[in-house]
Image: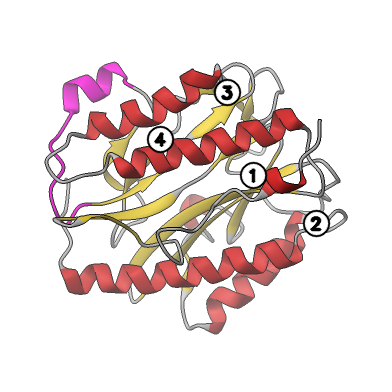
Amino acid sequence: MVTYKSSSEIAKMRIAGEVIVRVFELCTKILRPGISTGEVDSKVEELIRSNGDRPSFKGYCGFPASICASLNEEIVHGIPGDRLVREGDILCVDVGVIHQGWHADAARTYAIGVLSAERDALAQATADGLNAGIAAAIVGHRLSHIAQAVEAEGRRHGYGVVEQYVGHGIGTALHEEPQVPNCMTPALKRNDMVLKAGLVLAIEPMFNLGTADTRTKSDGWTVVTADGKCSAHFEDTVALTDNGPEVLTRKDATERIWTGSARSTS
């Protein structure tokens, strides 16, 4: 069932989003070659709990950590652990926060040191895809407008646009209706809906350098590209209002969510 949030409910989600902004600021400071994804997870959880809030992911369907840490060919749901990040890697940190029973959810892909131009371009296009999807999240539009805007950005560059994993509604549950695909699908054509004020969505494009096909590793969580090529993932929690979309998981509307390009090289 699709639910619509009041201004007071969105205010609580906004506070959860502000904590996520602080998480991303922390990640920018600590991510460097040689740090383990487990250490990143530990520091993020400490930050979230220091505010009296809770990580959305830890224990969710048995997930063992507070962040998903997905490296290179890992698309989503990477489990933090002893794996060290290396120069030239890209790492996606996906995190959720619960504030007074209300969730916010977002993801950022980070450059570890100096990237190849190929990886930099992939991450930039994925960030652009998220921005395009948010720009289409307008009251009176349809859900398909978001999907088509995201898909167009990925197709324009020839990337694999992941279909098997999608964005979602969010509120008192981490995952609510509706699903928010990143491309037009038969299911979306059947279940398209008009966007109304009070709807809150987690929009999250995932683009791959190669095929859009995926597989899940033996840990039962980590989703990787079927061909082993690199993937990038960005996500924001967005509240739809009569004055346009409000991104609850950014410091402000002008925030640049991909910063790796300044350090890239061919």
Q: Which residue is mark 3?
A: 214
CB atoms of marks 2 and 4 within 8 Å: no
C-alpha separation, residue under disc 1 versus residue under disc 4: 16 Å
Residue 87, placed above or below residue 81: above
Q: Quadrant of the C terminus?
A: top right
Mark 2 or 4, nearer chain start: 2
Can you say which quadrant of the picture contains the N terminus?
A: top left
Disc 4 and disc 3: Cα gap in Å? 13 Å
Q: Is residue 110 left or right of residue 257?
A: right
Indicate which disc, 2 or 3, sits on the residue closer to the N terminus.
2
Disc 3 crowd rating (10 Å Cα; few below 14, some 14-19, many 20+) is many
| Residue on which disc 4 sits | 166
Q: Is residue 188 magenta?
A: yes
Would residue 95 appear left or right of 72 to someone viewing this image? Answer: left
Any mark on residue 96, and which?
none
Kindly report the distance in space between the C-alpha atoms of the residues bearing marks 1 and 3: 13 Å
Task: Name the amino acid type tagged 4.
Answer: Val
Would you name the residue on which mark 1 appears? 78
Disc on the earlier residue, 1 or 3 = 1
Residue 223 visible? The answer is no
Q: Are marks 1 and 4 in contact (CB under 8 Å)?
A: no
Q: Nearer the viewer, residue 180 or 18?
A: 18
Type of the residue with mark 3: Thr
